[in-house]
Image: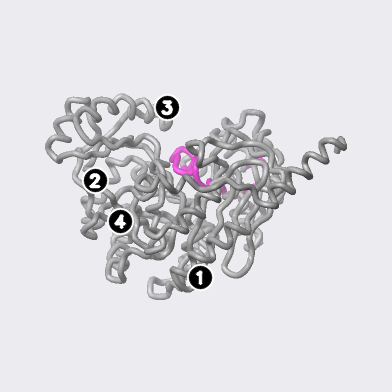
Amino acid sequence: MLRKILIANRGEIAVRVIRACAEMGIRSAAVYSEADRHSLHVKKADEAYSLGADPLAGYLNVHNLVTLALSTGCDAIHPGYGFLAENPELAIACTRRGITFIGPTAEVISRMGDKTQARFAMQKAGVPITPGSAGNLEDLEQALRVAAEIGYPIMLKATSGGGGRGIRRCDDAAALRRNFERVISEATKAFGRAEVFLEKCVVNPRHIEVQVLGDHHGHCIHLFERDCSIQRRNQKLIEIAPSPQIDEAQRQYVGGLAVLAARAVGYTNAGTVEFLQDTDGRFYFMEMNTRIQVEHTVTETITGVDLVEEQIRVAAGLPLRFQQHEISRRGVAMQFRINAEDPKNNFLPSFGRISRYYAPGGPGVRTDTCIYTGYTVPPHYDSMLAKVIVWALSWEDVLNRGARALKDMGVFGIKTTMPFYQEILRHPQFRSGHFDTGFLDAHPELLTYSEKRRKEDIAAALAAAIAAHAGL
């Protein structure tokens, strides 16, 4: 088993990995920029090391991270998600210098990170893909020809894209002409590559993804699906496991597709195969994420499997502890991404000092976070502050528990997405369990909620004013 793990990340995912290490008797080493000096992951880790003043450069420097791991006696690196998590260079550097990389091989990361290569691999394996360009597009004229052949609307995508960036829907040739150079520019800035491709747009799809685990002994299983259809601008906001929108036959089918996809590329460690489901119930491969995902928590909640612990065990060379028939699920889990944003102001980021914070509790409630009272949310990173995960035996019960948990939670001093989620939970269509990726666009009235201040807000503001007046 591994002895000490360097966590090449920050925020709540770093805290999550630290907790898994603690339970496994493995020492954890955190890294931080000066902007993160007071972050919770720095306080929780057994050791913590500065990456310097730049808020981003240190987290993205492969050589320095691997060198730091070696110099501090770490025998493994966990990349979390974001930053270098899907950068094959980190996996290569770890292998070259005798460090265990907690993730799949560099070859698999590279292959599945290239969306056109991933489509080729899935097509060869017999996994359904949407019609699209045979590879990367050479120029706008080729894009227009392919789009005319498969029919509009189409999705223009960065080949190395991810996280909802480098993607545009084009409903006609004029939109394709407008967006072609824009997507290339986004791809170049965000991913360092100018390649783009296009595929048929599945209109009003459901976003269904499947969690997979593979080891180095030839075993590969799935842990059921998650429904990530509630999203804004291709960014997931609420995730649910299992999906309330598919039946048992579809569940087994898409789970089998995910395992087929993972086996086709020799996948090891934890990964997610993402699909779009059209209005006729057909599934199409979208992409594979070669890392732990933000929403892994809902899978853990319904299966009881600690996915981060399994990541570490697989990386250490151990076989999976479960066969497919031993994986069962119970109840329904739902995760809310609590972001430091103001939904009523076009989701403008809301950074600053958290004057007061308390987490929700009670039966079936879990909170993964990196914040605390007095913490200052820096403006340099993703806006997610916390993840609130609720579990219950039924769909109706998990809706009610989610509403109660969001009402219980308190984050004061900044704006968050909590009241927006409460509106979603009240909406009849969402409560019916029938929605797709266009749900939020179709219901702008969700943003008309009242911002009436609660007693807790007023009390916090008064306390802050009194403290300021007293010079405290």
- Residue contact between numbered discs 4 and 2, judged by CB atoms under 8 Å: no
> Is 332 inside the magenta-drawn segment?
no
The residue depicted at 18 percent of the width and 39 percent of the height is 152
Disc 2: which residue: 120
- Residue contact between numbered discs 1 and 2, judged by CB atoms under 8 Å: no
The quadrant of the rendering that contains the C terminus is top right
| Distance (Cα) linking label 3 and label 2 | 25 Å
- Ranked by sequence position, the earlier of labels 4 and 3 is 3
For this rendering, which residue is in front, 175 or 224? 175
Disc 3: which residue: 189
Label 2: how many residues lie within 10 Å, few (<14), some (14-19) or many (20+)? some
- Ranked by sequence position, the earlier of labels 1 and 4 is 4
Label 1 SS: strand
Disc 1: which residue: 392
Label 1: how many residues lie within 10 Å, few (<14), some (14-19) or many (20+)? many
Asked whether residue 154 is in view, the answer is: yes
Label 2 SS: helix
Q: Amino acid at mark 4?
A: Ala
| Distance (Cα) linking label 4 and label 3 | 30 Å
Label 4 SS: helix
Q: Amino acid at mark 3?
A: Lys
**Marks 3 and 2: which is nearer the front?**
3
- Ranked by sequence position, the earlier of labels 1 and 3 is 3
Q: Report whether 124 appears left or right of 427.
A: left
Magenta stretch in the rendered image: 70-91
Label 3 SS: helix
Label 3: how many residues lie within 10 Å, few (<14), some (14-19) or many (20+)? few
